[in-house]
Amino acid sequence: MTDILIVNSSSEEYGETATGYPLGVCYLAAAAETAGFGTAFFDSYRTPWPAARAGFEKILRETRPLAVGFSCLSFNRNSARDAARLVKNIDPGAVTIFGGPHATPMQDQILENYDADIVVRGEGEITLVEILRALKNGDPLDGVGGIGFKRDGAVVRTPDREFISDLD
């Protein structure tokens, strides 16, 4: 079973000329796998989002994940929002998680205007594992540091998490 589908989406027009490797989301996938969670990955960074959308829908239907995590940068926020909407249309019970440099300072905006259930602020490796454990065990999210989530229509913000001190 797939517990988490991690998504690195492109923007509407950004694509073939993109360089770089999605190292940050690879760290997240490694943390989830190391903790024993079934992990899938979708990377459309080098494909403009309209062309990549069908591939995302296909992997979403094949994996039927418990949660879908989006790397949200300012340039890809619209494709991430579209992808989260697609998640909720296909599986309303799937939990959508946003993190990254755009999501961290824009937590309230994302929770209020996107189909986002949780926003991770700051470093996400430990936080993602704690979120997945809470979801699998049916535990409340209040004990997970460094996140925002919706409860009864209101945004709840947990205390910030300390930075990871040993990056090795």
Image (tube, grey):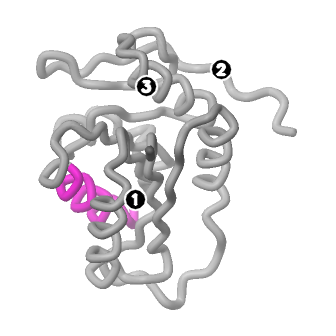
Q: Main secondary structure of the magenta part?
A: helix
Instruction: Residue under label 3, please give it.
Output: 147
The front one of 42 and 150 is 42
Q: Position of residue 139 (x, y in %)?
A: 38, 11
Is residue 83 covered in magenta?
A: yes
How many neighbours does mark 3 have within 10 angstroms: few (below 14), some (14-19), or many (20 or more)?
A: many
The answer to which image quadrant residue 107 occupies is top left
Q: Amino acid at mark 3?
A: Ile
Ranked by sequence position, the earlier of labels 2 and 1 is 1
Which disc is residue 74 wearing? 1
When the figure is inspected, residue 42 is found, relative to residue 65, above or below; the finding is: below
What is the span of residues highlighted in magenta in the rendered image? 74-87
Q: Quadrant of the C terminus?
A: top right
How many neighbours does mark 2 have within 10 angstroms: few (below 14), some (14-19), or many (20 or more)?
A: few
Q: Is residue 123 visible?
A: no
Q: Position of residue 41 (x, y in %)?
A: 50, 59
CA–CA distance in space, label 2 to label 1: 24 Å
In the displayed structure, does residue 13 sit left or right of residue 15? left
Ranked by sequence position, the earlier of labels 3 and 2 is 3
Is residue 148 covered in magenta?
A: no
Question: Who's the residue at 61% across and 64% down the image?
Answer: 22
Instruction: Residue under label 2, please give it.
Output: 162
Q: Is label 2 in a helix, a strand or a loop? A: loop
The front one of 168 and 12 is 168
Q: Is label 3 in a helix, a strand or a loop? A: strand
Q: Amino acid at mark 2?
A: Glu
In the image, farthest residue toward the front: 1
Q: Position of residue 116 (x, y in %)?
A: 26, 40
Question: Who's the residue at 50% across and 55% down the image?
Answer: 40
CA–CA distance in space, label 3 to label 2: 12 Å
